[in-house]
Image (tube, rainbow, N blue to C red):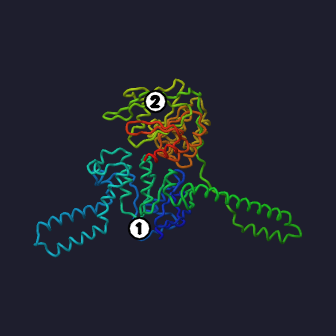
Amino acid sequence: MTLLSCSNIGISFGATELLKDITFTVAEGERWGIIGRNGAGKTSIFGVITGDIQPTVGAVARKPGLRHALLDQHRAFEGATTVWQAGAAAWRDVIALEQRIADQAMALGELGDKCTDEMLEKFGHDQERFADLGGYIYHARVDAVLQGLGFDAEESKTRLVSTLSGGERGRVGLAAQLIAPADLLMLDEPTNHLDLDTTTWLQEWLKECDETVLVVSHDRAFMDAVCTNILHIEAKTSEAYKGNYSQFVPQRAERRLTREREVEKQRAYVKKEEEYIRRNLAGVNSFQAKGKRKRLERLPRLAPPVGDPAAMSLEFKIAERGGDQVVSINELRVEVPGRVLVDDFTATLRRNDFIALVGPNGAGKSTFISTMLGDLAPASGEARVGSSITPAWFRQDLADLPLRLSLSDAIQAQRPLWSRGNIQNHLGAFGFSGDEVFREIRTLSGGERARMALALMTLAGANLLVLDEPTNHLDVENIEVLEDALDDFDGTVLLVSHDRAFLRQVATRVWWFDGTRLKDFDGPFDEWEASRARRA
């Protein structure tokens, strides 16, 4: 059964055209991944489906009574005091009905034989309605989803929403969306605040749930596990594909190749006909030449495959080779007030190691990095960075960006002898062109800030790259550019990420949290995954 159909949708804001000819049909039970460059209009498609954005042209057909669940980006959780209440927000009316039924039962018990038929009839009617609305299943669903997303179901009944961190609020918002009774789940980057285990739980939940799913994501492993269809947004328009992300990639390449061949074939035909017309227009074959010219004028010309602007151009160059022992860690203990994060960890970070640092959210990965690099003092033990080692740290929160400087001035501060042309060329490699280079960094979006942080990082000449969730704000194309740059990097990398496809591509070693123990697996990430699965 068709749940949703978008036909020739176009969206314009004034004279600016954002999308055109967006066409796809979603059947019940399908799970669509929506991919495209940052700013391509993926989230706007969600707005069209919900009715929050009216298309300039085209039409949206929805199944009558279609219920959708869309993550509240503001995460205000109005009316909810506890985490459990925030997760169960969509069931507020059912919870209120449950309380009324409980009050009625108590009143009926007190009245005994004095109960009227009208009271009993209302009690029975409310019980039937409670059952029809899913009253007997919602409690277990709330518990299961909160537990799956890393919250203790019992503790969440008393834990205050006001105590949540930003990442935890994101997970509670996602929980509320998954818990809500809906026919269509619309997820916008749902894995951004999830660790590896929680991401695995989410993909299994989505595969087993009854709802139809639309998901905007840059997590290729997640889309491989979840999606049955892909909608690719490129050059303001869309193409639909059957299958998951890995199946989409060769299909897209084949479509491009077929289109290029068709265009080339038509060009050769037009060239041949034009040559005939040129040679015969004034000769004995003039009549045939004029007929060919008319037919050529009416021929619809095929356009070459359209494409988005090129992804960023990224290269990490080291200023000096550095020693073979990059960081020496001996019996390191890392603490925060009231809690031990890492206890008695000994390891050596070697030259050309590409280490994945993995663990659940809140395990202390960022604090461990700060201690390893010397920004924080260890509780005991030591971490010593080699004297010839130059580290560069991509921070998850991008907190070290000079927000009040323009992009151009930030680069000039790192390269005072560069000309304006040198600066513009460097920023152009990261997708910033024209007057964009004079914008203040604080006005940039999350994806633009991530690209700016990388633009500054490439100037450091570092031989040790510490990358803390570098893919969070990058689209798929730019993640693949980052992978290629790391493949060519002749230094050492310590990488924190929940993007399993990215980790499988680049990580040659794994440091993983097991409680307060940090363990060293001397092998690539996919072997660590297999080893962990066997232990589980």
Q: Is residue 467 above or below residue 186?
A: above
Mark 2: amino acid: Leu
The furthest residue to the top: 387
Q: Which comes before the other along the chain, label 1 or label 2?
A: 1
Neighbor class of circle 2 (other Cα within 10 Å; few <14, some 14-19, many 20+) is: some
**Residue 287 at x, y percent in the picture:** 84, 72
| Secondary structure found at label 1 | loop
Instruction: Look at the image and tell me whether residue 15 can be seen.
Output: no
Out of 98 and 421, give the one closest to the viewer: 98
Identify residue type, mark 1: Leu
Q: Residue 85's spot in the image, x, y percent? A: 29, 54
Q: Is residue 490 left or right of residue 75?
A: right
The image's mark for residue 237 is none
User: 154 or 269: which is nearer to us?
Assistant: 154
Residue at which label 1 appears: 66
Q: Position of residue 492 (x, y in %)?
A: 54, 33
Which residue: 10% across, 72% down?
Answer: 114
On screen, 241 above or below 366? below
As drawn, which residue projects farthest toward the right?
284
- The residue tagged 2 is 373
The Cα–Cα distance between marks 1 and 2, rounded to whole angstroms, is: 53 Å
- Would you place residue 466 above or below residue 479 in this image? above
Q: Residues within 10 Å of mark 1 (few under 14, many from 20)?
A: few
